[in-house]
Amino acid sequence: MVSELEKFLVLMSMHEISYKKQEELLDTVKPLSLDKVFENPNGILSTEEVIKIAADFDETTFVASIENMKNSGIEILTIESEDYPESLINLPERPLILYAKGDLSLLKKDCFSIVGTRMPSSYGKIVTERFAKELAESGFVIVSGLCYGVDQISHRMALDAGGKTIAVVASGFNKIYPQTNFVLAQEIVEKGLLLSEYPPSFSAKKYTFPRRNRIIAGLGKGVLITEAAFKSGTTHTKEFALEYGRDVFAVPGNITSEKSQLTNHIIKTAQGECVLEPKDILEFYGMEAKAKKTKVETLSFDEKAIVDLLEGEPRDFDYLAKKSNIPVNILNSCLTTLEIRGLIRKLPAQMYALI
């Protein structure tokens, strides 16, 4: 059974009718019916919009298309749906409709958003991997936008850690952007949740990315920016987070790097908390890095010494050998074991870093 509200909101989303006009129609047309909407009370819609919508609309075909969405595993969440996220319901310009595919229960759990540049430096990659992995291991559902760079790393690390993730996309599910993340999107459907406010065949447009960012900001208890230039889409997410009263966290970076401009600015202007490691965020929320603690407790004496030396920043092999006093053959073995266990990663030039 397709409700009048579902029909109305799906139709409006297909024709890109603005949020403001949709809200005005919902306030004006009571009880809601598409026949009354097409009468265009108070001239809320433009003449061109009414003609276009009416010309494309056949109720039988339209209802069948909605039922096909549901049969393909797409849930339609309206502002009246039981599964609609409480974190979004009272926000200004809340999405009136959400298309969802995957585990809806994640919307009722503690979510945390991680965002940043699409082209992170090696430092940005290491930082994002470490924060996303440990926050996911500690129970947060990691939210991001399924784009290149920080988004992709955040989703990947959450899944690899055995955690959960929500991807908020700027397109419909049949037009995933970028296309190279299609396989990742399918894995998220199986192990997490895919969200969009656009119907399945909708292609991403320039304006849909900042609009998507308001959902990313709204879903999370907090928003972490690991690396981003001052003029970037991440700035929109930060502004939405501040407007919505969400906690903002930033990782400091090289003051000469353009990709650390936004994070350093957030810290300098006290718009957010400066964080140096995942436990800073966990302690902020009264949580503990349980999964990592368990792994570290099972390390040998030499392995723990290596992990301690890597706290804070990547180190090269010679530094580890000198500071640990571990024989080279044993050091090589320990590093391999730590890499296999997912505690460290090997970088170019014989550098090693914690994940």
Image (cartoon, helix red, strand yellow):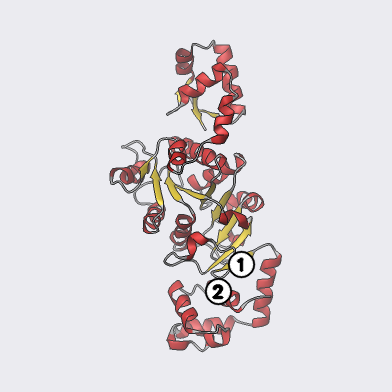
Mark 1 and mark 2 lie on one chain; the one further toward the N terminus is 2
Q: Position of residue 350 (x, y in %)?
A: 50, 23
Question: In the rendering, at what x and y percent does residue 337 appear?
Answer: 61, 23
Q: Residues within 10 Å of mark 1 (few under 14, many from 20)?
A: many
- Disc ID at residue 9: 2
Q: Residue at x 46, y 41 (%)?
A: 286
Question: Of 349 and 138, which appears nearest the observer?
Answer: 138
Along the line of sight, the residue nearer the viewer: 337 or 61 = 337
Calculate the distance from the C-alpha at mark 1 to the C-alpha at mark 2.
10 Å
Q: Which residue is mark 1?
A: 76
SS of the residue under disc 2: helix
Q: Are marks 1 and 2 in contact (CB under 8 Å)?
A: yes
Where's residue 77, x and y in %? 58, 66
Picture quadrant of residue 83: bottom right
Q: Residue furthest right?
A: 71
Q: Amino acid at mark 1?
A: Ile
218 lies above or below 49: above
114 relative to 245 in the view: left or right = right
Residue 40 at least partly seen = yes
Residue sticking out furthest to the left: 269
In the rendered view, tell whether residue 68 sits above or below residue 321. Answer: below
